[in-house]
């Protein structure tokens, strides 16, 4: 009876369309916050069910499966995209149609990868050798300058791939311009629903709120110690290139030439991604600058089209005479923030599970170096839930 009375009151105040719109937003908020609470609960249950073998924690199959099911369900609720892996680029494809700056280097690798007429030789030239050595050296310089563990300045999620960083920050659901547009759009759509029923003679037209696209999945690092030093990785790449270029080495170990060509292709893929990031510019105003400054600029750029769309929604509200509808804006903001918080924990849980080892009994080994990052992410999720949950529901 109380629920029916509340529904009747809302219908009387807001009209059927307005009441339905408000209830839909509230239910969406509660669904996302409940999903975040359940995933946190699943993580806490996982912690409680861990065993100890004297050296590290382990999880039995049913414990790991329960955590995985919770993460899958949360990812679906948050509309988190499926994992997209980052393989090495195909040398033939990149040599033919890759970025212009990289084509000659990929062609150099193809020639160096082919055996020459004399054992130990290759079909490359001195210019090809210089291109390959230069690319490996540049990749190391760019890695040190740009970094290899990026977080979005807007949504703060870690694990952003460097070559996709600018594109993501520009379209991030928590970009300041996008947040403002989403809030103003929600308020305008709500006012439109109410007024078309309550004051149809005003002829203000219809505003429809758009759904967010699927959230791009990141690859957050799960370890708290650097398992492979960047300098060691760079030295390995240099050694692979030198092996391919030095006849004595190729002649002595001809069976590993093909695998080393694949290794160098991986190194060139890294170089190409860093060059893409280094050469990037703001997609809205063309600003260029140091990479960190560029990301910060894109996150604040006043040329972002969402600013203008938000202003247009605010003008609609002025014509409607409804005011800003700040509480409705706050509701929309909470929904979007809850969705990001849920996506962040879900994608981290996936990476966490992927990092497990296994023992002779088939149990998942939770390496000790995973624990600090795990505790940090779980703590951040709890803080987000506490911050976003309405005080009456706390």
Image (spheres, rainbow, N blue to C red):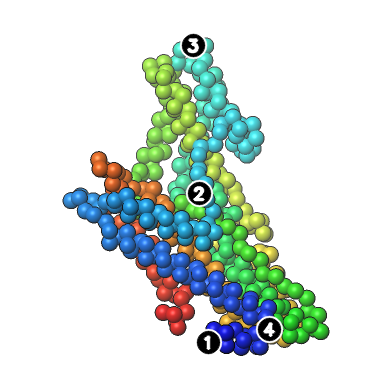
Query: Label 4: how many residues lie within 10 Å, few (<14), some (14-19) or many (20+)?
Result: some
Q: Nearer the viewer, mark 4 or mark 1?
A: 1
Query: Label 3: how many residues lie within 10 Å, few (<14), some (14-19) or many (20+)?
Result: few
Question: Relative to 201, does residue 175 appear above or below in the rendering?
Answer: above
Horizontal side of 189 relative to 35 (left or right) equals right
Residue 164, given in percent of the width and then of the height, sits at 56, 50
Quarter holding residue 385? bottom left
Tell me what residue is drawn at x 37 percent, y 56 percent: 66
Residue 40, given in percent of the width and then of the height, sits at 39, 65
Nearer-N-terminus badge (2/1): 1
Q: Which mark is residue 118?
A: 3
Q: Which mark is residue 83?
A: 2
> Between marks 4 and 1, how big is the CA–CA gap?
19 Å
Between 5 and 38, which is closer to the camera in this rendering?
A: 5
| CB atoms of marks 2 and 1 within 8 Å | no
Quarter holding residue 259? top left
> Between marks 2 and 4, how big is the CA–CA gap?
43 Å
Nearer-N-terminus badge (2/4): 4
Q: Which residue is mark 1?
A: 2
Residue 242, given in percent of the width and then of the height, sits at 43, 27
Horizontal side of 199 relative to 66 (left or right) equals right
Nearer-N-terminus badge (3/1): 1
| CB atoms of marks 4 and 1 within 8 Å | no
């Amino acid at each position: 009876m109380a629920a029916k009375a509340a529904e009747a009151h809302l219908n009387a105040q807001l009209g059927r369309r307005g009441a339905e719109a408000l209830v839909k937003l509230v239910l969406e908020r509660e669904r996302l916050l409940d999903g975040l609470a359940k995933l946190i609960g699943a993580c806490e249950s996982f912690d409680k069910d861990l065993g100890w073998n004297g050296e590290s924690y382990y999880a039995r199959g049913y414990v790991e499966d329960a955590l995985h099911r919770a993460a899958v369900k949360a990812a679906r609720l948050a509309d988190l995209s499926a994992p997209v892996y980052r393989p090495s680029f195909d040398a033939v494809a990149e040599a033919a149609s890759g970025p212009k700056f990289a084509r000659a280097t990929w062609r150099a690798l193809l020639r160096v990868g082919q055996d020459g007429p004399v054992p130990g030789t290759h079909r490359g030239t001195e210019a090809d050798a210089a291109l390959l050595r230069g690319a490996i050296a540049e990749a190391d310089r760019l890695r040190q300058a740009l970094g290899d563990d990026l977080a979005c300045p807007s949504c703060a999620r870690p694990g952003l791939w460097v070559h996709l960083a600018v594109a993501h920050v520009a379209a991030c659901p928590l970009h300041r311009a996008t947040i403002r547009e989403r809030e103003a759009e929600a308020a305008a759509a709500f006012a439109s629903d109410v007024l078309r029923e309550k004051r149809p003679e005003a002829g203000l037209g219809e505003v429809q709120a758009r759904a967010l696209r699927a959230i791009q999945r990141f690859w957050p690092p799960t370890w708290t110690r650097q398992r492979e030093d960047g300098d060691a990785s760079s030295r390995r790449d240099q050694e692979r290139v030198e092996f391919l270029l030095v006849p004595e080495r190729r002649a002595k170990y001809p069976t590993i030439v093909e695998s080393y060509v694949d290794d160098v292709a991986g190194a060139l893929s890294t170089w190409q991604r860093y060059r893409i990031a280094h050469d990037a510019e703001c997609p809205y105003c063309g600003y260029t600058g140091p990479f960190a400054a560029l990301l910060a600029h894109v996150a604040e750029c006043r040329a972002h089209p969402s600013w203008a769309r938000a202003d247009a929604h605010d003008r609609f509200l002025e014509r409607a005479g409804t005011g800003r509808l700040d509480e409705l804006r706050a509701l929309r903001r909470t929904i979007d923030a809850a969705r990001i918080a849920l996506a962040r924990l879900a994608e981290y849980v996936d990476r966490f599970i992927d990092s497990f080892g296994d023992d002779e009994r088939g149990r998942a080994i939770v390496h000790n170096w995973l624990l600090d990052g795990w505790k940090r992410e779980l703590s951040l999720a709890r803080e987000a839930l506490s911050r976003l949950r309405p005080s009456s529901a706390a």
